[in-house]
Amino acid sequence: EVQLEQSGAEVKARGQSLKISCKASGFDFSNSWIAWVRQTPGKGLEWMGSIYPGDSETTYSLSFRGLVTISADKSIRTAYLQWSSLKASDTAIYYCSRQLSSYLDVWGEGTTVIVSS
Amino acid sequence: TQMTQSPSSLSASVGDRVTISCQASQDIGNFLAWYQHKPGKAPKLLISDASELESGVSSRFSGSGSGTFFIFTISSLQPEDIATYYCQQFDNVPSLTFGGGTKVEIK
């Protein structure tokens, strides 16, 4: 079964760092693009960026470039999204998804990140 | 490419036909998808390539359009269809853009 298992909810203070994960199973992880998508009540779904674990090629939305880092470890079939210094505005639900061609066909259940001020 | 989705919300009765539109700021061919997102759940891909229904998705859902204007239709609204629906385009793989979403409620 094709699955993406995301790490659990996080509550962090402003300024702290954070790395959340997305573990894949049931498909060729190294040869698939993995996307990260943010959900906020005010802005809906926003694509943040994608990574190709086979060679770690990464592309970012202009809105998120420089604000987050997307990485992957193909040996353990896991993709990551990380922040070096969280802001209150990073409070959201973050989804990873398999990007099949140009659509997102399989999604993780989401990781809730709450940043307290 | 910017995606303008409308309406942002709608309320309809069970059995009604519901339509949502999505306009692209430039020609994207038929490279458009529609997703259903229920609270507390992961989004679900319903339609790809503007009109191709994903396997296992109810035939109540359909999509049409090409170029810059696209339509998503629910032929007969059911209570389980309550969700927010998003269009999504790609014009420079793997860069993606979502529309603003349409929240569908039962009247």
Image (cartoon, coloured by chain):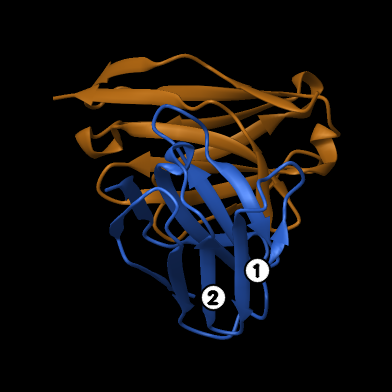
- Give the answer, above or below, for where B78 lies relative to A1: below
Coordinates of residue A30 in the picture (x, y in percent):
82, 36
Q: Which residue is rendered at x = 56% and y = 57% of the image?
A: B34
Report which quarter residue A17 is drawn in: top left
Q: Colour of chain B?
A: blue
Q: Which residue is rendered at x = 13% and y = 25% of the image?
A: A117
- Distance of mark 2 from mark 1, alpha carbons? 7 Å
Q: Which residue is rendered at x = 80% and y = 33% of the image?
A: A29
Q: Specify the subunit that label 1 lies on.
A: B
Q: Secondary structure at mark 1?
A: loop
Q: Same chain, marks 2 and 1?
A: yes
Q: Nearer the viewer, residue B72 or A70?
A: B72
How crowded pointer 2 is (Cα within 10 Å; few <14, some 14-19, many 20+) is rated as many
- Picture mark count: 2
Disc 2 marks which residue? B70
Q: The chain drawn orange is chain what?
A: A
Mark with earlier residue (2, 1): 1
Disc 1 marks which residue? B50
Q: Nearer the viewer, residue A23 or B107?
A: B107
Q: Secondary structure at mark 2?
A: strand
Coordinates of residue B9 in the picture (x, y in percent):
29, 57
Q: Amino acid at mark 1?
A: Ala
Q: Specify the subunit that label 2 lies on.
A: B
